[in-house]
Amino acid sequence: MPNRLINQTSPYLLQHANNPVDWYPWGEEALTRAKTENKPLLVSIGYAACHWCHVMERESFENEEIAGQMNESFVCVKVDREERPDIDAIYMQAVQALTGHGGWPLTVFLTPDARPFYGGTYFPPDDRHGMPGFPRLLEALSTAYKDRQGEVLQSAETITSHLQSAVRATASTDPLQASIFTQAALALEASFDDIAGGFGGAPKFPQPMPQEYLLRHHHRTGDPTALSMAEQALQAMAHGGIYDHLGGGFHRYSTDAQWLVPHFEKMLYDNALLARLYLHAYQVTGNGLYRRVVEETLDYLLREMRHPDGGFYSSQDADSEGEEGKYYVWHPHELADLLGQADAELFSSVYGVTWEGNFEGRNIAYLPIPLTEAAEALGTTEAELSAKLAPIKAKLLAARDQRIHPPLDDKVLTSWNALALRAFAEAGSVLGNERYREAAEVNGAFLLDHLHQDGRLLRTWKDGRAHLNGYLEDYAFLITALLSLHEATQSHRWLHAAKQLTDEMLTLFWSETDAVLYDTGNDHEQLIVRPRDFSDNAIPSGSSVAAEALLLMASLTGDEDYSRKAVLLLRTVRDYMTQYPSGFGHWLCALDVYLSTPTEVAVVGPPNDSATQALLEQIYKPFSPSLLLVALDPAEANPFASPILESRNAANGLPTAYVCHHYVCQLPTNSPDVLAAQLAERA
């Protein structure tokens, strides 16, 4: 018989709807029962693509005896961390304080008023590898709550006090200056893996925000080391098994330091952030490898992760048929059967396929040497080799598509979609790809039409139903994405929407008393802490992107209060940026926007006019991270009021560009060559 999760929209919660555990979704019903019966809460937090979440479900939550023990002694609550990042952030911080580490599944025990007193991550069904078995843990905590409740409550009070103190912001009085960039770059260099690329050891995560910062630092200073670090990581990931060489897109992370064996789930946010990172690397270097990765990754999202109405799904699971990675790996005999011996041998030699295998007796395709070197070894050119491999890869992809697919988490999350929207909009502009530009337009319209209701952005949408209040990240990510969408399409609809969302964001999340933005709105349910997760993790923090958004909106509108608030936010993390740059990569990018003072470019002309497009191409082509483009179609029915567009006309009746730096402008030009020269002066 289904439990209370059966009416939820989250695919993760629905996965647990037929467990014998008497699960509640997070909410007043569960909290009221816990208080009425004076029972502790057992809160289990995870997400649909989480491999170890599935393991714990199979081992414990589907076990009738363990489920009975849970139901008897606790009020059990299931949380999808992707729908409720606030709940996840609070209790993840508690578990990290208790144990020194965190992860998912997150298992936390709370008093009836939701204060944590114990927690951990995965627990096995019996004592194993130094970990207590879950039944023994349940018994011990239940007994402690019944027999030593005073001690438990005191522990909960101590942990809660720690959580409350952790969100308080202390603004630095030291200046925000360019020396921060130098210190951050040196700190990143110290933690860089100069053998395999990237930062740290196994497990190794892509960390796109520090890489973005390195590209900006190189652009700002010409530092060759910054570019070298970024390129080494980007090439290593693109060659490794973390990248899907048949279908495009990146897996979540590598279990080893060499980027070979991934944890196989694919997340929308990783692929959106990495596509944009590789796009910027392509702008900086012109390296065709980076362009290919961008196109293959975005094509993957369009092919496998897009709702017919234009929203993007959240993730694909690591497991299929109960086995991690089964969907993606190959044995040489499969290749021979599908391709014939000659093509199988060619594919195997290029993509590292052996009879021994590199993953549990089977093979993850990867490039042991770059394609250029492989072509040289085979006595051909890279172009010729790629042409030979293209139909082979297409045939293997078609065959793989006949396998049982990993489960899909098909909810649409606002913030993750905004990351994808920004990547598609920028790629459409830089690569001149109309399909990407159209996907961005459709996605932007989808988010505004379906997830912005009654003056409030919502978090999640599935099967026609949008619900849950949006968080700071939802607002901030969408504002910056809409600005990119305007640059790609020249439509002022997106500027009006960005301004409206900016003002809503400040009304809901800004605290003038504390001079910070909180992650939850002032209309949110009251939790034990009002969360403020200010470090950049797998995705940028809501606050770091909000700082960037406010700086851009200040330039767009001339409203200095936006800039004032952005500076206050930057001051709260000033010292962290130099000491822990790997966790503050997007903050460093926002600081770069502040210290650079964006170059503002106005282009006046019909969007479909070839002369307008010729001007826009000069703007899109180079890597210009601090450039803000505002375009005006003379036929725009509802033009946005921006000082950048003030008194801007089509000179000589032709499409015209105006290059400005903090409202001081050069002579208008109709010439793409003159525009390119003006932009180069400001680079």
Image: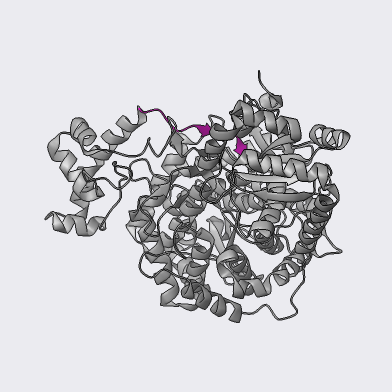
**Horizontal and vertical percent position of residue 25:** 72, 33
Residue 410 painted magenta: yes
Q: Quadrant of the N terminus?
A: top right
Q: Name above or below for residue 275 compared with residue 618.
A: above
Q: In which quarter of the image is residue 20?
A: top right
**Horizontal and vertical percent position of residue 120:** 64, 49
What secondary structure prevails in the magenta region?
loop
- For the record, the magenta segment spans 403-413
The residue positioned 59% from the left and 81% from the top of the image is: 179
Q: How many marks?
A: 0
Q: Name the residue furthest top.
A: 1
Colouring used for the render: one colour
The residue positioned 26% from the left and 45% from the top of the image is: 357
Residue 267 painted magenta: no
Query: Can the viewer see residue 139 in this picture?
Result: yes
Looking at this view, is 585 or 61 the one in front?
61
